Amino acid sequence: MRLTRRHLLATAASPLLFPTFPALAQQPRRGGVLVVAADTEPRNLNPALVASNGVFFVASKVIEPLAEMAYGEPGLTPRLALAFEGAPDGRSVTFRLRPGVRFHDGRPFTSADVAYCALELWKKHQNLGRVFFKDLEAVDTPDPLTAIFRFASPTPLQLVENALPALTAVVPRHLFEGTDPLTNPHNQKLVGTGPFRFVEHRPGQFYRLERNPDHWDAPKPWLDGIVYRVLPDRGAIAAALEAGEIQLAAFSAVPLADMKRLEKLPGIAVIDKGYEGITYQLTVEINHRRKELADVRVRRAIAHAIDPNFVVERIFLGWAKPATGPIPRFDRRFYTADVPTYPYDPKRAEALLDEAGLPRGPNGVRFSVELLPAPWFEHTRQMGDYLRQALKAVGIEAKLVVKDPAGHQKAVYTDHAFDLAIGSPVYRNDPAISTTILYQGGLPPGVPFSNQYGYADPAMDELIARAARTLDPAERAELYRRFQRLAAEQLPLIPVVEFTFLTVASTRVRGVADNPRWATSHWAETWLEA
Amino acid sequence: MESAGPSPALRLAWRRLAQAPFVLAIVVVGAFLLLEAAPGDAVDAYVASLGGDAGFVHDLRTRWGLDRSAPTRFLLYLAGLATGDFGWSVAFGRPVLDVILERLPVTLALAAAATALAFALGTGLGILAGARPGGPLDRLLSALALLLNAVPSFWLGLLLGLLFAVRLRWLPLAGIETIGVHYTGLARLLDTARHLVLPTLTLGLVYAALYLRLVRAGMVEAWRSDFVRAARAKGIARRRLVLRHVARNALLPVVTMLGLQSATLIGGSVVVESVFAVPGLGRLAAEAVTQRDLPLLLGIVIVAASLVLIVNLVVDLLYARLDPRVELGHRSP
């Protein structure tokens, strides 16, 4: 097997590879400050340390990764790296960096910054990077524009490539080296190379960014600045849009029930693109330590009791799709529909439960469970209500236990004090980043969003491990298709639907949703109509 | 008869000051125990938003001192408090006192404005209603008060926002300042005042309804008393009778209520501050609970309890001044 030299990024910039949105067809206009809603204020805003959507939403405009996701092939567009190539043995990846880039404080961006971030921030401290870069041994910097990542064990180039958008934000070495990175003031007062400079954060009120006139992609960005107004109340966000106090609300910050009404208002648009690269799923998490639930027939019965179309239509009001497995449809490289499925069929569910030796008792109940819907989305809570009813129809009594985020995290992922839970895992552009961890056995308690379900299967573990070290992209993709089939067969957890978010914006805002993780990307191409 | 030595007012103030540490201690221990009893800690709350491996979770817990037992953490907190150190907010990554002092002025301004509005509107309308109990105006105002009392403040806030900010566009909907315009001096004050109109209305109207009912009830009671009957027999003009005799006596319970409500105002501001995105202490308290930020929550509790103690002391002093029958330093039998 031999990996060919990769040079995707240089060619990915070709406009031929991007689908053209009507908005982009117009000539962008310079100027204007875009005011958007923010519902959280992350305690650490540095994406080199904290890879999360809440952080990226603000910080990705200031601090850039090596590459960003793009629609179409090859799926990436260059930011701080122009090209990269992997060694045939999978033990190194060489990045060619963009010349002439400067940080906002005027100092040049070089390979030393990349090396520092990779070894000292991503690998040691970043929530996702700690796992992903654990085998990163060294980063050689033969010249200021070349960084060679050296891995202790073969690492698929495809995986590295897929991790670039979310895991490789670069901050200046000269501001972090010799300090405690976790308490460095520049985790709040951001300095990066991005199209916008960080100006101020008034806690509880707003973040303000201004145009970086020296950006490498000049004359972009088109906007003069971005203001993130902190609006904790979702009803108030909808009202602020109507009042014209904000021009954009991302991440479905407006309740779905309000979307249809807002969509009809003149001057407001609801956009359902721009989040495919961070697709979430609504899943039923199952505690296999519970005797009844350890039986695959019971898990399949629960799957048959759920009507995904109902969930799509009633909970998501149509803005979701039924899921077939742990990998969303958008990722055509890995996704397969060729898996066992469990269509909505309550009779089949009841037959399976009978077969599992769980007949209805005199009160019509087969057994009872505690059901913990995760509190972070309105959909997870509503799914809890729906699942309770769906289970009741087949003789399973579910008691809803609703906790706040800290309580839910502890109950499900540390104490395993649940029978069923409603979770919402996110798929991050590669199954190895945050998806296979939901199926992998042997993880210690306390690891959030991981297999804390008591499910362990050597065949599954072997498959996951093999895919993670397979260098050939086609072979690796095939292993992940097998992973999906095994996951659907054994059904350790039940992916019900996949969903992304909606953006509600004034129709004056253009250049929206032009890449699959738009809300968490740079916004250099976003502009405001006069 | 007055005795020699410190004035009764001063004695009351000293006594309250001496009681304050005990009251605060009870409040702090209670808040600590309540938050400790809640499942999950600050690390659970944090990683619930971003994930991380076992080492990441363990390192955070060590760094934030959450690997120590609850009693140890509490003793360390108290030791810090004795030296004036309110601790470190894990949710904000900053000293607790800095975070609180940043938010306190906004809540104080909002609470003061809402109280002033509630007092002025509530007593004014209450006097109008109580001037002729059972009359058409009384019925109308009583119904209005009932309605305002029944309306949840978040709903009232959203309705006021929809009317004045979305439809009429007279007032800003959220925040406390116009972003990107750096006003100074009077212009800044006016800008902030304009932003606080809707939150003040929302918070104030609910309490105004309460004062209205209180004053009205007090006046209905006063109309039946002997001194009013005597005053009427003396032929005192109705207007003077209402204002000088009936209403004055009915105002006393309102003063008491002002003190009691200083605590509920802070509670009520949690909702109003969220709806109107006002960066105040109420919203901060809600965030501290969600984030399980124990030092921050304890800091807020101490500040809020201190405020309540101060306001109640002032109210007691005021009460004695308004009603000479009340003697400072003596409990009622």
Image (cartoon, rainbow, N blue to C red):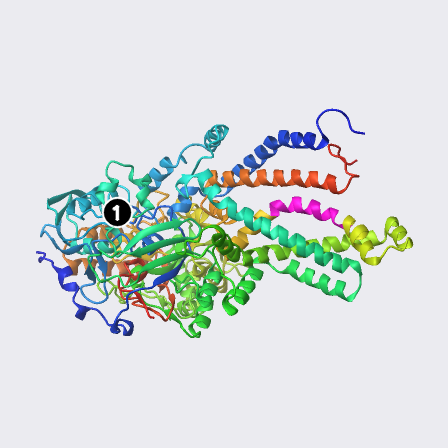
Q: Is residue B284 above or below residue A300?
A: above
Q: Position of residue B213 (x, y in %)?
A: 72, 56
Front residue of B299 and B184: B184
Nearer to us in this view, B259 or B87: B259
Q: Where in the figure is residue A375, as x and y percent of width and height?
A: 45, 54
Residue at 18%, 69% (x, y): give it. A15
Residue in view at x 73 percent, y 32 percent: B329
Kindly identify which residue carries mark 1: A129
Q: Quadrant of the N terminus of chain A?
A: bottom left
Q: At which x and y percent is residue A441? A: 30, 48
Q: Is residue A7 visible?
A: yes
Q: Nearer the viewer, residue A423 or A38?
A: A38
Main SS category, magenta section = helix
Residue furthest front as drawn: B186
Residue A119, quarter of the rendered image = top left
> In screen coordinates, is A106 left or right of B142?
left
The C terminus of chain A lies in quadrant: bottom left
* Identity, as a three-letter code, of the amino acid under mark 1: Gly
Q: In the rendered structure, the residue with mark 1 lies on which chain? A: A
Does B252 appear in magenta?
A: yes
Query: Is B262 in the magenta?
Result: yes
SS at mark 1 in the image? helix
Residue range of the region highlighted in magenta in the rendering: B250-264
Residue B328 spot, x, y in % from top left = 74, 34
